Image: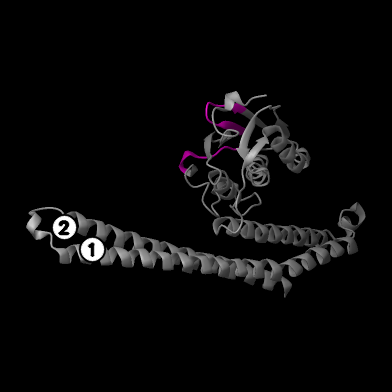
Amino acid sequence: MMGSAALAGIVSFAAAGLLWYMYFYQKEKKLLQRLYDIIEQAEHAGVGDEEKVSEEKVSMIEDKFRRFVNNSLMENENNRRQKQVIQGLISDISHQTLTPIANLKLYAELLQEAVGYGTKEDAAVNPELAEITATLCGQTEKLDFLIQSLVRLSRMETGLIGVHPQTADIQSLFDTVHCEYGKKAAEKGISLTFGESGLKAFFDMKWTGEALGNIVDNAVKYTQSGGKVCVSAQAYPFFVRIDVADNGIGIAAADFHRIFTRFYRSLSADDQPGVGIGLYLAREIVQAQRGYIRVASKEGEGTVFSVFLPPADGGSVKDKVN
Protein backbone atom coordinates (compact mmCIF):
# COMPACT_ATOMS: atom_id res chain seq x y z
CA MET A 1 0.00 0.00 0.00
CA MET A 2 2.80 2.41 0.86
CA GLY A 3 4.57 1.75 -2.45
CA SER A 4 1.34 2.34 -4.37
CA ALA A 5 0.79 5.67 -2.60
CA ALA A 6 4.31 6.83 -3.44
CA LEU A 7 3.97 5.81 -7.09
CA ALA A 8 0.58 7.53 -7.30
CA GLY A 9 2.21 10.71 -5.98
CA ILE A 10 4.87 10.53 -8.71
CA VAL A 11 2.29 10.09 -11.46
CA SER A 12 0.19 12.98 -10.14
CA PHE A 13 3.23 15.22 -9.86
CA ALA A 14 4.43 14.49 -13.40
CA ALA A 15 0.97 14.97 -14.91
CA ALA A 16 0.42 18.27 -13.09
CA GLY A 17 3.81 19.60 -14.17
CA LEU A 18 3.13 18.74 -17.81
CA LEU A 19 -0.29 20.41 -17.75
CA TRP A 20 1.09 23.61 -16.19
CA TYR A 21 3.90 23.73 -18.77
CA MET A 22 1.49 23.36 -21.67
CA TYR A 23 -0.77 26.05 -20.20
CA PHE A 24 2.03 28.61 -19.76
CA TYR A 25 3.44 27.86 -23.21
CA GLN A 26 0.14 28.37 -25.01
CA LYS A 27 -0.60 31.60 -23.10
CA GLU A 28 2.81 33.01 -23.97
CA LYS A 29 2.33 32.18 -27.66
CA LYS A 30 -1.05 33.95 -27.73
CA LEU A 31 0.33 37.09 -26.08
CA LEU A 32 3.30 37.26 -28.46
CA GLN A 33 1.04 36.77 -31.48
CA ARG A 34 -1.19 39.63 -30.35
CA LEU A 35 1.83 41.88 -29.93
CA TYR A 36 3.02 41.01 -33.44
CA ASP A 37 -0.44 41.85 -34.84
CA ILE A 38 -0.42 45.25 -33.12
CA ILE A 39 3.05 46.07 -34.42
CA GLU A 40 2.06 45.00 -37.93
CA GLN A 41 -1.00 47.24 -37.85
CA ALA A 42 1.13 50.14 -36.66
CA GLU A 43 3.58 49.59 -39.52
CA HIS A 44 0.79 49.47 -42.11
CA ALA A 45 -0.75 52.58 -40.60
CA GLY A 46 2.44 54.51 -41.26
CA VAL A 47 2.86 53.38 -44.87
CA GLY A 48 1.32 55.24 -47.81
CA ASP A 49 -0.23 58.65 -48.03
CA GLU A 50 -0.39 60.63 -44.80
CA GLU A 51 -4.03 61.37 -45.49
CA LYS A 52 -4.87 57.70 -44.89
CA VAL A 53 -3.54 57.79 -41.35
CA SER A 54 -6.66 58.80 -39.54
CA GLU A 55 -7.12 59.70 -35.92
CA GLU A 56 -9.52 56.81 -35.65
CA LYS A 57 -6.93 54.25 -36.70
CA VAL A 58 -4.33 55.64 -34.30
CA SER A 59 -6.87 55.53 -31.53
CA MET A 60 -7.73 51.94 -32.35
CA ILE A 61 -4.07 50.91 -32.20
CA GLU A 62 -3.58 52.70 -28.87
CA ASP A 63 -6.64 50.96 -27.47
CA LYS A 64 -5.40 47.54 -28.58
CA PHE A 65 -1.96 48.17 -27.15
CA ARG A 66 -3.47 49.31 -23.84
CA ARG A 67 -5.57 46.17 -23.67
CA PHE A 68 -2.51 44.08 -24.49
CA VAL A 69 -0.56 45.66 -21.61
CA ASN A 70 -3.48 45.15 -19.22
CA ASN A 71 -3.85 41.52 -20.29
CA SER A 72 -0.11 41.00 -19.85
CA LEU A 73 -0.25 42.37 -16.32
CA MET A 74 -3.21 40.13 -15.59
CA GLU A 75 -1.38 37.10 -17.00
CA ASN A 76 1.65 37.86 -14.82
CA GLU A 77 -0.57 37.96 -11.76
CA ASN A 78 -2.22 34.70 -12.78
CA ASN A 79 1.18 33.11 -13.30
CA ARG A 80 2.25 34.23 -9.84
CA ARG A 81 -0.83 32.65 -8.29
CA GLN A 82 -0.36 29.47 -10.30
CA LYS A 83 3.23 29.21 -9.08
CA GLN A 84 1.88 29.34 -5.56
CA VAL A 85 -0.47 26.49 -6.43
CA ILE A 86 2.45 24.49 -7.83
CA GLN A 87 4.46 25.23 -4.70
CA GLY A 88 1.62 23.83 -2.63
CA LEU A 89 1.42 20.77 -4.84
CA ILE A 90 5.15 20.13 -4.54
CA SER A 91 5.01 20.53 -0.77
CA ASP A 92 2.07 18.14 -0.55
CA ILE A 93 3.79 15.50 -2.69
CA SER A 94 7.08 15.70 -0.79
CA HIS A 95 5.25 15.61 2.55
CA GLN A 96 2.86 12.79 1.63
CA THR A 97 5.60 10.56 0.21
CA LEU A 98 8.19 11.24 2.91
CA THR A 99 6.72 8.91 5.54
CA PRO A 100 5.76 6.03 3.20
CA ILE A 101 9.21 5.95 1.60
CA ALA A 102 10.94 6.19 4.98
CA ASN A 103 8.82 3.26 6.22
CA LEU A 104 9.59 1.24 3.10
CA LYS A 105 13.32 1.78 3.63
CA LEU A 106 13.06 0.86 7.30
CA TYR A 107 11.08 -2.34 6.75
CA ALA A 108 13.34 -3.36 3.88
CA GLU A 109 16.41 -2.99 6.09
CA LEU A 110 14.70 -4.89 8.92
CA LEU A 111 13.83 -7.67 6.48
CA GLN A 112 17.44 -7.84 5.40
CA GLU A 113 18.54 -8.20 9.00
CA ALA A 114 15.85 -10.82 9.68
CA VAL A 115 17.03 -13.09 6.87
CA GLY A 116 20.67 -12.41 7.70
CA TYR A 117 21.39 -10.96 4.30
CA GLY A 118 25.10 -10.60 3.70
CA THR A 119 26.22 -13.67 5.63
CA LYS A 120 27.43 -16.67 3.63
CA GLU A 121 25.41 -19.13 5.71
CA ASP A 122 22.03 -17.48 5.23
CA ALA A 123 22.67 -16.60 1.61
CA ALA A 124 23.47 -20.25 0.95
CA VAL A 125 20.36 -21.45 2.79
CA ASN A 126 17.92 -19.09 1.04
CA PRO A 127 19.61 -17.23 -1.82
CA GLU A 128 16.27 -16.36 -3.42
CA LEU A 129 15.03 -14.53 -0.32
CA ALA A 130 18.35 -12.70 0.00
CA GLU A 131 18.07 -11.55 -3.61
CA ILE A 132 14.48 -10.37 -3.09
CA THR A 133 15.38 -8.28 -0.04
CA ALA A 134 18.35 -6.75 -1.87
CA THR A 135 16.09 -5.82 -4.80
CA LEU A 136 13.49 -4.35 -2.46
CA CYS A 137 16.10 -2.12 -0.79
CA GLY A 138 17.53 -1.04 -4.13
CA GLN A 139 14.14 -0.14 -5.59
CA THR A 140 13.18 1.79 -2.46
CA GLU A 141 16.37 3.82 -2.68
CA LYS A 142 15.63 4.49 -6.35
CA LEU A 143 12.10 5.65 -5.52
CA ASP A 144 13.42 7.99 -2.83
CA PHE A 145 16.01 9.41 -5.25
CA LEU A 146 13.35 9.92 -7.94
CA ILE A 147 11.01 11.82 -5.61
CA GLN A 148 13.81 14.06 -4.32
CA SER A 149 15.06 14.74 -7.86
CA LEU A 150 11.59 15.65 -9.10
CA VAL A 151 11.05 17.99 -6.18
CA ARG A 152 14.40 19.77 -6.75
CA LEU A 153 13.76 19.97 -10.47
CA SER A 154 10.27 21.43 -10.12
CA ARG A 155 11.33 23.97 -7.52
CA MET A 156 14.13 25.15 -9.79
CA GLU A 157 11.90 25.39 -12.89
CA THR A 158 9.12 27.28 -11.13
CA GLY A 159 11.54 29.71 -9.51
CA LEU A 160 10.64 28.55 -6.01
CA ILE A 161 14.34 28.04 -5.35
CA GLY A 162 16.73 30.55 -6.89
CA VAL A 163 20.49 30.55 -7.18
CA HIS A 164 22.39 33.27 -5.32
CA PRO A 165 25.84 33.57 -6.92
CA GLN A 166 28.72 35.19 -5.11
CA THR A 167 32.50 35.12 -5.35
CA ALA A 168 33.70 31.70 -4.20
CA ASP A 169 36.74 29.40 -4.44
CA ILE A 170 36.77 26.66 -7.05
CA GLN A 171 38.87 24.54 -4.68
CA SER A 172 36.10 24.61 -2.05
CA LEU A 173 33.67 23.44 -4.73
CA PHE A 174 36.03 20.59 -5.65
CA ASP A 175 36.44 19.55 -2.01
CA THR A 176 32.66 19.42 -1.50
CA VAL A 177 32.06 17.25 -4.56
CA HIS A 178 35.00 14.97 -3.76
CA CYS A 179 33.69 14.31 -0.24
CA GLU A 180 30.31 13.32 -1.65
CA TYR A 181 31.39 11.09 -4.54
CA GLY A 182 34.88 9.92 -3.59
CA LYS A 183 33.62 6.87 -1.69
CA LYS A 184 31.26 5.82 -4.51
CA ALA A 185 34.10 5.99 -7.04
CA ALA A 186 36.43 4.01 -4.78
CA GLU A 187 33.82 1.29 -4.23
CA LYS A 188 33.56 0.86 -8.01
CA GLY A 189 37.33 0.81 -8.42
CA ILE A 190 37.53 4.13 -10.24
CA SER A 191 40.23 6.76 -9.72
CA LEU A 192 38.51 10.10 -9.02
CA THR A 193 40.97 13.00 -8.88
CA PHE A 194 40.54 16.75 -8.51
CA GLY A 195 43.23 19.17 -9.57
CA GLU A 196 44.46 21.89 -7.25
CA SER A 197 43.00 25.28 -8.13
CA GLY A 198 43.51 28.80 -6.85
CA LEU A 199 40.80 30.20 -9.11
CA LYS A 200 37.71 32.09 -8.03
CA ALA A 201 34.41 32.43 -9.87
CA PHE A 202 30.95 33.88 -9.40
CA PHE A 203 28.56 31.05 -8.49
CA ASP A 204 26.19 29.62 -5.90
CA MET A 205 28.24 27.10 -3.91
CA LYS A 206 25.32 24.84 -2.95
CA TRP A 207 23.58 24.65 -6.31
CA THR A 208 26.77 24.55 -8.37
CA GLY A 209 27.93 21.73 -6.12
CA GLU A 210 24.69 19.95 -7.05
CA ALA A 211 25.33 20.55 -10.77
CA LEU A 212 28.99 19.51 -10.74
CA GLY A 213 28.14 16.57 -8.50
CA ASN A 214 25.57 15.34 -11.01
CA ILE A 215 28.15 15.48 -13.80
CA VAL A 216 30.78 13.67 -11.70
CA ASP A 217 28.21 11.07 -10.64
CA ASN A 218 27.33 10.56 -14.30
CA ALA A 219 31.01 10.08 -15.18
CA VAL A 220 31.53 7.54 -12.38
CA LYS A 221 28.36 5.70 -13.35
CA TYR A 222 29.38 5.22 -16.99
CA THR A 223 33.06 4.45 -16.44
CA GLN A 224 34.11 0.85 -16.02
CA SER A 225 36.00 -0.43 -12.99
CA GLY A 226 39.66 0.52 -13.25
CA GLY A 227 38.84 3.69 -15.16
CA LYS A 228 39.61 7.31 -14.37
CA VAL A 229 37.59 10.47 -13.78
CA CYS A 230 39.60 13.70 -13.61
CA VAL A 231 38.20 17.11 -12.60
CA SER A 232 40.23 20.23 -13.31
CA ALA A 233 39.81 23.99 -13.75
CA GLN A 234 41.49 26.61 -15.89
CA ALA A 235 41.14 30.34 -16.46
CA TYR A 236 39.68 31.77 -19.62
CA PRO A 237 39.53 35.52 -20.35
CA PHE A 238 35.89 35.81 -19.29
CA PHE A 239 35.08 32.42 -17.75
CA VAL A 240 36.37 29.76 -15.43
CA ARG A 241 36.24 26.41 -17.19
CA ILE A 242 35.76 23.21 -15.17
CA ASP A 243 36.38 19.94 -17.03
CA VAL A 244 35.07 16.55 -15.91
CA ALA A 245 36.94 14.02 -18.08
CA ASP A 246 36.48 10.24 -18.02
CA ASN A 247 37.59 7.25 -20.10
CA GLY A 248 34.21 5.53 -19.92
CA ILE A 249 31.76 4.26 -22.53
CA GLY A 250 31.38 7.64 -24.24
CA ILE A 251 28.33 9.21 -25.88
CA ALA A 252 27.12 8.78 -29.44
CA ALA A 253 27.17 11.96 -31.52
CA ALA A 254 23.45 11.56 -32.20
CA ASP A 255 22.75 11.81 -28.46
CA PHE A 256 24.61 15.09 -27.86
CA HIS A 257 21.47 17.22 -28.17
CA ARG A 258 19.36 14.78 -26.12
CA ILE A 259 21.39 14.11 -23.00
CA PHE A 260 20.37 17.42 -21.40
CA THR A 261 16.64 16.80 -21.84
CA ARG A 262 14.48 15.61 -18.97
CA PHE A 263 14.19 11.84 -18.44
CA TYR A 264 16.28 10.98 -21.49
CA ARG A 265 18.44 7.89 -21.17
CA SER A 266 20.48 6.32 -23.94
CA LEU A 267 19.81 2.69 -24.83
CA SER A 268 23.44 1.94 -23.94
CA ALA A 269 22.77 3.16 -20.37
CA ASP A 270 19.74 1.03 -19.58
CA ASP A 271 21.76 -1.23 -17.30
CA GLN A 272 22.77 1.72 -15.07
CA PRO A 273 20.65 3.23 -12.27
CA GLY A 274 19.16 6.67 -12.83
CA VAL A 275 16.10 8.49 -14.12
CA GLY A 276 17.63 10.96 -16.61
CA ILE A 277 17.33 14.15 -14.56
CA GLY A 278 20.89 14.85 -13.40
CA LEU A 279 22.33 16.46 -16.54
CA TYR A 280 19.17 18.44 -17.22
CA LEU A 281 19.23 19.86 -13.70
CA ALA A 282 22.96 20.60 -13.99
CA ARG A 283 22.42 22.63 -17.16
CA GLU A 284 19.51 24.57 -15.64
CA ILE A 285 21.60 25.47 -12.59
CA VAL A 286 24.61 26.61 -14.63
CA GLN A 287 22.51 28.63 -17.08
CA ALA A 288 20.72 30.33 -14.18
CA GLN A 289 24.16 31.72 -13.22
CA ARG A 290 24.96 33.04 -16.75
CA GLY A 291 27.15 30.05 -17.52
CA TYR A 292 26.89 27.13 -19.91
CA ILE A 293 27.90 23.48 -20.37
CA ARG A 294 29.63 21.89 -23.35
CA VAL A 295 30.24 18.19 -24.05
CA ALA A 296 32.79 16.38 -26.22
CA SER A 297 32.83 12.61 -26.52
CA LYS A 298 33.64 9.54 -28.62
CA GLU A 299 31.99 6.18 -28.12
CA GLY A 300 34.31 3.79 -26.34
CA GLU A 301 36.92 6.47 -25.61
CA GLY A 302 35.36 8.66 -22.94
CA THR A 303 33.66 12.01 -22.39
CA VAL A 304 34.57 15.52 -21.29
CA PHE A 305 31.90 17.78 -19.80
CA SER A 306 33.03 21.42 -19.60
CA VAL A 307 31.27 23.84 -17.24
CA PHE A 308 31.86 27.54 -17.88
CA LEU A 309 31.20 29.86 -14.91
CA PRO A 310 31.30 33.68 -14.82
CA PRO A 311 34.41 35.32 -13.34
CA ALA A 312 34.59 36.59 -9.77
CA ASP A 313 33.13 40.11 -9.46
CA GLY A 314 33.08 40.56 -13.24
CA GLY A 315 36.02 41.39 -15.48
CA SER A 316 38.77 39.03 -16.53
CA VAL A 317 39.27 35.77 -14.66
CA LYS A 318 43.01 35.89 -15.05
CA ASP A 319 43.12 39.07 -13.04
CA LYS A 320 41.44 37.26 -10.13
CA VAL A 321 43.83 34.34 -9.82
CA ASN A 322 45.56 34.23 -6.42
Counting residues from the N terminus, which is met first, the one under dot 1 or under dot 2? Answer: 2
Q: Quadrant of the C terminus?
A: top right
Whether residue 41 is visible to the viewer of this picture, yes or no, is yes
Residue 66's place in the image compared with 162, above or below, is: below
Q: Is residue 70 magenta?
A: no
- Residue shown at the point (56%, 36%) measured from the top left: 310
Q: Is residue 238 magenta?
A: yes
Determine whether label 1 and label 2 are within 8 Å by CB: yes
Residue lying furthest front in this view? 55
Query: Which circle marks residue 45 in the picture?
Result: 2
Question: Looking at the image, which is closer to me, 293 or 222?
Answer: 293
- In the image, the segment drawn in magenta is 234-254
Residue 95, x across and y down, in percent: 70, 68
Query: Which circle marks residue 61 in the picture?
Result: 1
Residue 19, x across and y down, in percent: 48, 68
- Residue shown at the point (58%, 31%) measured from the top left: 240
Q: Quadrant of the N terminus?
A: bottom right
Residue type, label 1: Ile
Report crowding for label 1: few under 14, some 14 to 19, many 20 or more residues within 10 A (C-alpha): some
Residue lying furthest right in this view? 121
**Residue 312's quadrant in the figure?**
top right
Residue 41's place in the image compared with 206, above or below, is: below
Residue 41 left/right relative to 29: left
Report crowding for label 2: few under 14, some 14 to 19, many 20 or more residues within 10 A (C-alpha): some
